[in-house]
């Protein structure tokens, strides 16, 4: 029996159940073990004020090391760049939609943000998000607009949006899609292709003890190499920039035939400064893309943003 550890939010449970189904397809019996994380307990403080590295993974890491569970299922973007000693990533699953989605309070708000001519200072109600990356990129596109902090699981945030006077709130598109939340349940949705996502957004990862060979072998059947390559580039970029959830870095790598396209950015927290670089490389040379992106950012004087 493989004990699958997960947070008890609806989305985390969905992800753990998906992993369990795949393991059972390969003839491994499973059971879910629910563990509450620090990030699920404090729903008030903005993430960037908590010191967020591992806030959603720490409790599960401890459970793994204490042998209370056998594997842990995470949104890959929540896993710190440096994993806990004694643990390793056993599998990275095929990625879902990596982009962000604006859930709007009204069709009128959706229509407004859909039109390129409305770029610039927005004399509109607030937009809600707890992500400093989303906040920074939004303020770069709509300077001066009020941003409200919004914490909680997907359904909690949707309820807060419905009871607010905000214009909308920003969610990971993958989370909404995994829960089957269409416009009928949430209200108008607007995909944000201009907003670069967090490294590894939309991907799921399975973590286990580093020397547990039988579990490593079992989880290897769930691994998607294309997703691993792309998220590896994004997370290496984050590592080299020494960034975390409290730094507005963003990056997205995508495979296009035999080529990989990597777009990376850094935005000042107030949105005033934004540097974006785009690189394309042969798939066989992907390991150099993160370093090349950083070289280009330095040429663009990225330090003026980091110094803020």
Image: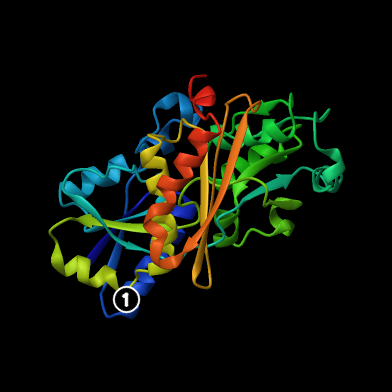
Left or right relative to 128: residue 98:
left
- Residue depicted at 60% across the width and 62% down the height: 180
Left or right relative to 47: residue 225:
left
Q: Quadrant of the N terminus?
A: bottom left
Q: Nearer the viewer, residue 54 or 271?
A: 271
- Give coordinates of residue 215: x percent, y percent: 20, 66
Residue at the spot of label 1: 24
Residue 230 occupies quadrant: bottom left
- The count of marks equals 1
Above or below residue 145? Residue 81 is: below
Q: Nearer the viewer, residue 203 or 4?
A: 203
- Residue depicted at 37% across the width and 56% down the height: 287
Above or below residue 5? Residue 144 is: above
- Residue depicted at 77% across the width and 42% down the height: 105
Is residue 250 visible in the rendered image? The answer is yes
Left or right relative to 277: residue 283:
left
Left or right relative to 17: residue 119:
right
> Which element carries disc 1, helix, strand or loop?
helix
């Amino acid at each position: 029996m493989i004990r699958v550890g997960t947070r008890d939010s609806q989305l985390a449970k969905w992800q753990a159940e998906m992993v369990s189904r795949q393991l059972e397809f390969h003839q491994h019996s499973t059971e879910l073990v629910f563990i509450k994380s620090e990030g699920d307990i404090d729903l008030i403080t903005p993430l960037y004020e908590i010191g967020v590295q591992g806030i959603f993974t720490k409790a599960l890491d401890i459970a793994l090391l204490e042998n209370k569970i056998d594997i842990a299922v995470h949104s890959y973007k929540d896993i710190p760049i440096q994993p806990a000693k004694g643990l390793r990533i056993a599998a990275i699953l095929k990625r879902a939609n990596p982009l962000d989605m604006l859930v709007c309070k009204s069709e009128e708000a959706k229509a407004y943000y859909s039109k390129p001519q409305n770029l610039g200072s927005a004399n509109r109600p607030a937009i809600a998000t707890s992500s400093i990356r989303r906040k920074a990129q939004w303020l770069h596109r709509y300077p001066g607009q009020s941003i409200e902090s919004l914490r909680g699981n997907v359904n909690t945030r949707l309820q807060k949006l419905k009871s607010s006077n905000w214009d909308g709130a920003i969610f990971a598109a993958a989370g909404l899609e995994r829960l089957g939340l269409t416009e009928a349940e949430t209200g108008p949705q607007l995909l944000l292709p201009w907003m670069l996502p967090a490294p590894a957004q939309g991907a799921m990862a399975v973590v286990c003890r580093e020397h547990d060979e039988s579990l490593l072998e079992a989880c290897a059947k769930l691994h998607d190499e294309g997703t691993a390559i792309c998220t590896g580039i994004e997370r290496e970029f984050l590592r080299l920039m020494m960034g975390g959830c409290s730094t507005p870095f963003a990056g997205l790598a995508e495979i296009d035939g035999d080529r990989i396209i990597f777009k990376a950015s850094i935005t000042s927290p107030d949105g005033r400064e934004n540097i974006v670089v785009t690189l394309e490389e042969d798939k066989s040379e992907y390991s150099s893309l993160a370093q090349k992106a950083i070289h280009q950012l330095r040429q663009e004087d990225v330090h003026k943003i980091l110094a803020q």
